[in-house]
Amino acid sequence: MNEPQKTSSTDNVAVCATKIVGAKNVLTAPEDIIPYGFDGTAAIKQRPLAVVFPADTAQVSAVLRLAREHRVPVVTRGSGTGLSGGSVPVEGALVVCLAKMNRVLELDTANLTLLAEAGAVTQEIYDAADKAGLFYPPDPGSMRVSTIGGNVAENAGGLRGLKYGVTRNYVMGMEVVLADGSVCQLGNKCVKDVAGYNLRDLFIGSEGTLGIITKVLLKLLPKPAARQTLLATYAQMDAAAATVSDIIASKIIPCTLEFLDRKTIRCVEDFAHAGLPLDAEAVLLIESDGHAAAVADEAAQIEEIARKHGATSVRRARDSDEAAQLATARRSAFSALARLRPTTILEDATVPRSELAHMVRFVESVATRHALDIATFGHFGDGNLHPTILTDERDTDEMHRVEAAMQEIFDEALRVGGTITGEHGVGLAKKKFLPAQLGDASYALLKNIKRALDPDGLLNPGKIFD
Ligand SMILES: Cc1cc2nc3c(=O)[nH]c(=O)nc-3n(C[C@H](O)[C@H](O)[C@H](O)COP(=O)(O)OP(=O)(O)OC[C@H]3O[C@@H](n4cnc5c(N)ncnc54)[C@H](O)[C@@H]3O)c2cc1C
């Protein structure tokens, strides 16, 4: 694959871009572009050449043609909340930020679909559906800020993944601009469509390396009639893990099944004041939704299972306010932990559910062996753990230990049949671990697909693989 190189005309690209999107939609001043030099990933930053804010698909297409002409790399950006360095620019890159293409274009109540521009904020999509009595389930913890384009590009998960799946399960179609500026319409409102390869799915989770997603057509569901939130408290982490296994084995699939360890509980409580039990070793936040009678029955069964496995208490949210407070507490885990040390490295190792207790214990042993501060929380129902390393990137010795710890955690996740990332993507942060997971043939196939769609290697170069 040809690597992009900075040419003498590179600096003119920003000037030419103003002719496409207007001067007020191009940033070049150092103080203006610094915020676009990093995302939510710790210790990775790089200043871009310029940032452009297109207003529509035609402008995106023209910007890509311009970049190709000048051989300038392009890094697509939504809100920059990514946790694997996906929207961190490479040197000399043009950042194409979709933040101004943020409209919900259509809510089709006959077909239960919603069409939005890629820069629409996830929460606004949820709210638009909710107002019509409908439901967009994927709810990444960052949904108040993240864009739907970023969610699709990362195939984002969320707290409701166990029952409702991830972003991929709701994408019916999309509009994508390819590296040469051509515009593709992929998918449609049909529930069934097997015409040709499923190109739409190729772009889900492609992390800005294959094209720029400009519109997304989403599937909506009827809004569940009732919800019940429970908080189960444990003196031992193993008991929490056993509860999760037993709930699933009992053929109950709650909407949410989240885990917080002792360190995270204390930190979140100090931050969010949701009444979490400070003496607990672990808590499970569980939500059941659906028909009111089914929810009541499911919640009773879940409570019984939790108590059978030694939960010291099971608290039921009295009303939607208390349920929202508990969900907000869980959503604030990353922000709460980030206050403790200068650098927060949130990992995403995911394992088969049967390996959860082992994996949490393994992470604890890694923390002890490398003298590191690691808190763990995550989507237990999905086997998706977020071991969060609290560190200081200025401390070289500690960062070496962090590297070693991460390597051990990923090696162990792969050894037990897991993955290096359940929802945050590969980006820059995890690309060195990818070959071990994919193996030679799959890794080569991935690169061949990239080469076919982006022969000049201009779209988000250096992400996922070199
Ligand atoms: C507090 C917090 C909580 C989080 N919780 C979750 C969670 O529960 N689940 C989860 O999965 N993630 C979570 N994340 C990670 C992050 O929010 C998601 O990956 C989200 O999808 C990123 O959206 P964004 O708009 O910020 O994208 P960005 O960070 O701007 O970009 C992410 C990647 O997508 C590409 N991209 C963005 N827009 C487009 C587009 N229109 N076309 C093509 N490529 C594009 C970028 O190039 C980059 O590679 C969390 C992050 C934070 C900070």
Image (tube, helix red, strand yellow):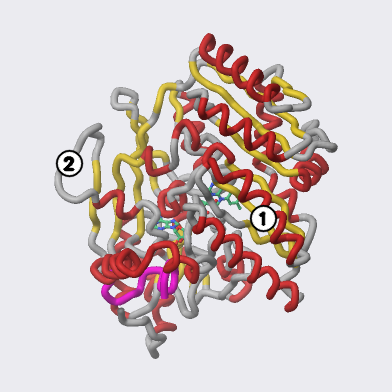
Q: Quadrant of the C terminus?
A: bottom left
Q: Nearer the viewer, residue 174 or 360?
A: 360
Under mark 1, the amino acid is: Val
Which residue: 51% across, 74% down? 48
- Find residue 268 and report its horizontal and vertical position in percent: 76, 43
| Above or below for 176 versus 1 | above
Which residue: 68% across, 18% down? 319
- Find residue 17 and report its horizontal and vertical position in percent: 39, 71
Mark 2 or 1: the one toward you: 1
Q: Main secondary structure of the magenta part?
A: loop
Label 1: which secondary element: helix
Q: Nearer the viewer, residue 24 or 53?
A: 53
Residue 350 in view of the camera = yes
Judge the density around disc 1: few (<14), some (14-19), many (≥20) Cα neighbours within 10 Å: many
Does the magenta run of residues contain 461? yes
Q: Quadrant of the N terminus?
A: bottom left
- Report the disc number at residue 363: 1
Judge the density around disc 2: few (<14), some (14-19), many (≥20) Cα neighbours within 10 Å: few
Mark 2 or mark 1, earlier in chain: 2
Which residue: 81% across, 43% down? 266
| Above or below for 5 versus 173 | below
Q: Residue furthest left?
A: 195
Q: Which residue is mark 2?
A: 194
- Report the disc number at residue 327: none
Residue range in magenta is: 454-466
Q: Residue furthest top?
A: 293
| Above or below for 45 versus 61 | below
Under mark 2, the amino acid is: Val
